[in-house]
Amino acid sequence: MNMNSIKINSFVLILLSATSNHLLADSNTHDKSLWNRLYIGSHINSVHYKSNVTTSSNPGSYFINDDYSQLMDAGSGSPSGNDISGGINIGWNYAWDNFIFGIEADYLHANKKLKIHSGDIFYITQPADTFRTTSQINIKDTFSLRPKVGYMWGGSLVYITGGVSLAKLEHSFNFSETFENQLSSAKKSKTQIGWTIGAGMEHAINNNWSVKLEYLYTEFDDLKTSSPLSGYPDQIIDNKVSVKMSDFRVGINYRF
């Protein structure tokens, strides 16, 4: 089991253990009218971003022997960072007995930059000369569309959710060296699809307003870039970039 699975399971267990006494005491006490509605809301998010970058090159006329492994080690890495942001959501719930079936769409405002900078690295095959690489990943606004299933008691609701996500990802790569002053650069921006899964708890303040606590884990499809060396068009440098998000959010909803 990986760390992200442990986080998700732990979060669900916390929700269940925190509400188990109420479930037992109030399993027959619920008000469908509280949840059986259209709603809109907003949320504040604490997000941890992590990217995995893999740099490689094909056999060509410039890189030889140990150059390939040096390039891969210099360009590859797993930059990460945290950010506080916010977003909005809209959804609808249908109540059946003690259960809730719903769907929610949400938007998260994001503009997080992650970076890998190798610094100057001396060639093993040409010890008097150096090269350097730089990768920058920009994660911009994200969207998700998620069905959810929950259990209600009294004025509270616990639920699990999962669905599809979209984000605008941008990757830029630069290579330079002092042996022949070769350069290589690539930049690509694309809306990538991904998947998300999570769990949450919501509590009604009154007939229209409720507050919620939610966790979502998201992964997006890889973004790939390629660029040749300026003087060696057959020598291509490839990059593969993946992005993952762990999102803890606190929000408020208004139910119509």
Image (spheres, rainbow, N blue to C red):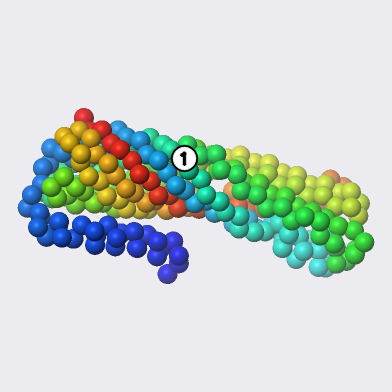
Locate residue 227, reporting x and y percent: 74, 47
- Which residue type does callout 1 highlight? Ser
| Vertical relation: 251 (above or below) 71 | above
**Residue at the limit of the structure toward the top, as seen here:** 256
Residue 242 can be seen, yes or no? no
Q: Is residue 121 left or right of residue 105?
A: right
Q: Residue at the location (10% across, 54% down)?
A: 26
Residue located beneath label 1 in the image: 85
Q: Residue at the location (8% across, 49% down)?
A: 29
Locate residue 201, reporting x and y percent: 27, 50
Locate residue 20, reporting x and y percent: 18, 60
Disc 1 residue crowd, few under 14, some 14–19, many 20+, Cα 10 Å:
some
Q: Is residue 140 left or right of residue 248?
A: right
Locate residue 226, reporting x and y percent: 70, 48
Q: Residue at the location (85% across, 63% down)?
A: 123
Helix, strand or loop at mark 1: strand
Image quadrant for the N terminus? bottom left
| Vertical relation: 252 (above or below) 14 | above
Task: Determine the image quadrant of residue 62.
Answer: bottom right
| Vertical relation: 140 (above or below) 135 | above
Residue nearest the viewer, comparing 86 with 192: 86
Q: Is residue 191 left or right of residue 158?
A: right
Q: Residue at the location (29% across, 44% down)?
A: 212
